Image (cartoon, grey):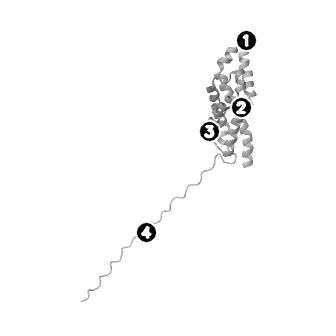
Amino acid sequence: MIIGRLLLRFLLVPLGGSIAILVAVLVVLVAEWNRFAALNGDDNSGLMAFFVIGPMLAFSMAYMLFPAILAALIAEAFAIRSLLYHAICGGLSAWISLVTIGALDKDYDLSGEPLIAVGAGIAAGFAYWAVAGWTAGFWRPVFASAPPPPPPPQILPPVERQALPPPPPPPPAAA
């Protein structure tokens, strides 16, 4: 059982990471649509930039994924399944990545809108959680059966009360 869950994690974690990357790229491309539309003259070069150059730039900066990979490994190791954890880690890893690309920033102006990058990271964190994060930790069962309820208290038959014997008569007074 645990081997099967481990193998499932080896499939779900990369799938979740790939979908998270796709969601982040789509968020950035939609948010920066005006930049891509400005490239479009009478020809379809803007569409080529949208569907070819944009994703190529995103995947060429794969080193920016390291903070997100670290957050996913921590979530798997400690079975952290919180949506908030994954969304915050996605936004934080996007912000850290944006800060670390200093040399590329001069050529491509990538940090003009850091809010877009952080928003893309949050969306990517949510996408990862939806695919793989909600079942994080192969050693912890997802749908664990609840412990059985405690047995109901036993109802004892009522105890019949017997009348108390009358008190003994007082001793005679000594004369």
Disc 1: which residue: 43
Between 147 and 125, the one nearer to me in the picture: 125
Q: Looking at the picture, how far across and down is residue 35, in whole percent? A: 67, 18
Mark 1 touches mark 4? (CB < 8 Å)? no
Q: CA distance from mark 3 to mark 2?
A: 19 Å
| Comparing labels 2 and 1, the label whose residue is closer to the camera | 2
| Comparing labels 3 and 2, the label whose residue is closer to the camera | 2
Mark 2 touches mark 1? (CB < 8 Å)? no
Mark 3 touches mark 1? (CB < 8 Å)? no
Count of number-bearing discs: 4
Which amino acid, by three-letter code, is at mark 2? Answer: Met
Disc 2: which residue: 64
Q: CA distance from mark 4 to mark 3?
A: 58 Å
149 sits to left or right of 106: left
Most extreme residue toward the bottom is: 175
Q: Quadrant of residue 16?
A: top right
Which of the two labelled residues, at mark 3 and mark 1, occupies the earlier sequence position? 1
Q: Looking at the picture, how far across and down is residue 83, in whole percent? A: 61, 38
Mark 3 crowd level (few <14, some 14–19, many ≥20, 10 Å Cα) = some
Q: Quadrant of residue 161?
A: bottom left
Which amino acid, by three-letter code, is at mark 4? Answer: Val
Which amino acid, by three-letter code, is at mark 1? Answer: Asp
Disc 3: which residue: 85
Disc 4: which residue: 159
